[in-house]
Amino acid sequence: MTASRRSAKEHGRSIARLYLVTPPIDAPALAGQLAAALDAADVAAVLARGPASGEATLLDRVRAIAPAVQDRGVALLIDGDPASVAPAGADGAHVTGTAALDAALPILKPRFIAGCGGLASRHDAMTAGERGADYVMFGEPDRDGHRPAFAAIVDRVTWWAELFEVPCVGWAMSLDEVAALAAAGADFVAIGDLVWTDPAGPGRAVAAAAAQLKLSEPVT
């Protein structure tokens, strides 16, 4: 998840890839759903959102879905619990805010991926990048489902992509947002609920999101 944006652009191709966010990993069927989703299109990483029932359950659930993810060459990240990464056999963690990043870096580096979201300002984003985040995320909803206006998210992604080498993830709530974020310069586009609520299944939703990425590719 740390490939250089510059080298990809020099070859005249889009570098945006999908970043899949799970629902809380309580459902026994999730491993099968993940397999269907990951077989449908190229996905760079899966972020596992933990169950509400505690660390022991989190470890068991992450281990249960890990083969569906990692056997396909996809990075498996844990949301908000860097201490569980090594015991669960995951590839890294995603944390919220620069204080959480500071606490996570000694646990994760240099072996694991450390991603950071919950960045309320440009200064916070720059701070996360300077301190060693492997990527920064813009536009994710908070616990109440609120987030900034989409135009502001696109503006933040565009600003970051133009100035910084650390990759950025833009969070898409709809298929239209997938293409817009990729066109703005996001290295990865996060998709979550739009995948798991698709009546045709997660595979169809991921394939549709991948098709939106292709629409954003520059003409060469």
Image (cartoon, helix red, strand yellow):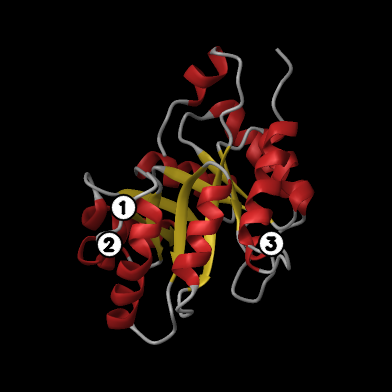
Judge from the rendering whether residue 56 lies leftward or rightward of residue 77; answer left or right: left
Percent of width and height locating residue 110: 22, 44
Q: Residue at x 34, y 61 (%)?
A: 66
Percent of width and height locating residue 98: 42, 56
Residue at the bottom extreme of this rendering: 53
Percent of width and height locating residue 170: 61, 47
Mark 3: secondary structure: helix
Mark 2: secondary structure: helix
Tell me the kind of residue under disc 3.
Leu
For marks 3 and 1, the one nearer the N-term is 1
Residue under label 2, please give it.
85
For marks 2 and 1, the one nearer the N-term is 2
Foreground disc of the pair 3, 2 = 3
Q: Residues within 10 Å of mark 2 (few under 14, many from 20)?
A: many
Q: As displayed, is residue 28 above or below residue 171?
A: below
Residue under label 3, please give it.
194
Q: Residues within 10 Å of mark 1 (few under 14, many from 20)?
A: many
| Label 3 close to label 2 by CB (< 8 Å) | no
Residue 96 seen in the current view: no
**What is the spatial separation of the Cα atoms under label 2 and label 1, in whole angstroms?**
7 Å
Compare residues 37 and 76 and report the one nearer the observer.
Answer: 37
Q: How many marks?
A: 3
Residue under label 1, please give it.
91
Judge from the rendering whether residue 41 lies leftward or rightward of residue 81; answer left or right: right
Picture quarter with the N terminus: top left
Picture quarter with the C terminus: top right
Q: As displayed, is residue 94 above or below residue 44?
A: below
Q: As displayed, is residue 49 above or below residue 45?
A: below
Compare residues 15 and 133 and report the one nearer the observer.
Answer: 15
Tell me the kind of residue under disc 1.
Asp
